[in-house]
Amino acid sequence: MEQDYRLAEGEYRFACLVWANEPLGSGQLVALANEALGWKKSTTYTVLKKLGERGLVQNEESVVTALASRETVT
């Protein structure tokens, strides 16, 4: 059984970028987050790390993929 995740609005919008574009390079994700959310590189990597520690996404060799499905997020 998959875990349910609770995300803040910004985290959810970020996760939606990952779901819509995965797998994607972390540099590409920085560009997407800047365009869609107005985030700087440091903000993108901070949220990426936070969601990675929670088991929602992974950044393996600079390729970002989701570990949890959209249905598990509230």
Image: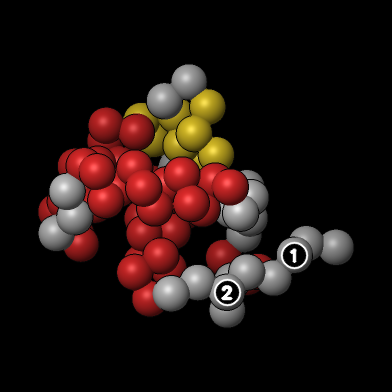
The residue identified by callout 1 is 3
Q: Secondary structure at mark 2?
A: loop
Judge from the rendering whether residue 53 lies leftward or rightward of residue 48; answer left or right. Answer: right
Judge from the rendering whether residue 2 lies leftward or rightward of residue 8; answer left or right. Answer: right
For this orientation, the residue located farthest to the top is 61
For this orientation, the residue located farthest to the right is 1
Nearer to us in this view, 26 or 70: 26
Give how far across and how far down residue 40 sits, in percent.
17, 48
Judge from the rendering whether residue 64 lies leftward or rightward of residue 45; answer left or right. Answer: right
Residue 41 vs 10, above or below: the answer is above
**Which quadrant, please, contains the N terminus?**
bottom right
Would residue 70 be visible to someone looking at this image?
yes
Badge 1: how crowded within 10 Å, few (<14), some, or many (20+)? few
Q: Residue at x 30, y 48 (%)?
A: 44
Q: Secondary structure at mark 1?
A: loop
Q: Residue at x 44, y 29 (%)?
A: 63
Q: Residue at x 36, y 59 (%)?
A: 14
- Asked which quadrant contains residue 37, the reply is bottom left
Callout 1 amino acid: Gln
Give how far across and how far down residue 15 sits, in percent.
44, 59
Nearer to us in this view, 45 or 23: 45
The residue identified by callout 2 is 6
Residue 15 vs 73, above or below: the answer is above
Callout 2 amino acid: Arg
Q: Residue at x 42, y 47 (%)?
A: 48
Give how far across and how far down residue 22 sits, in percent.
45, 42
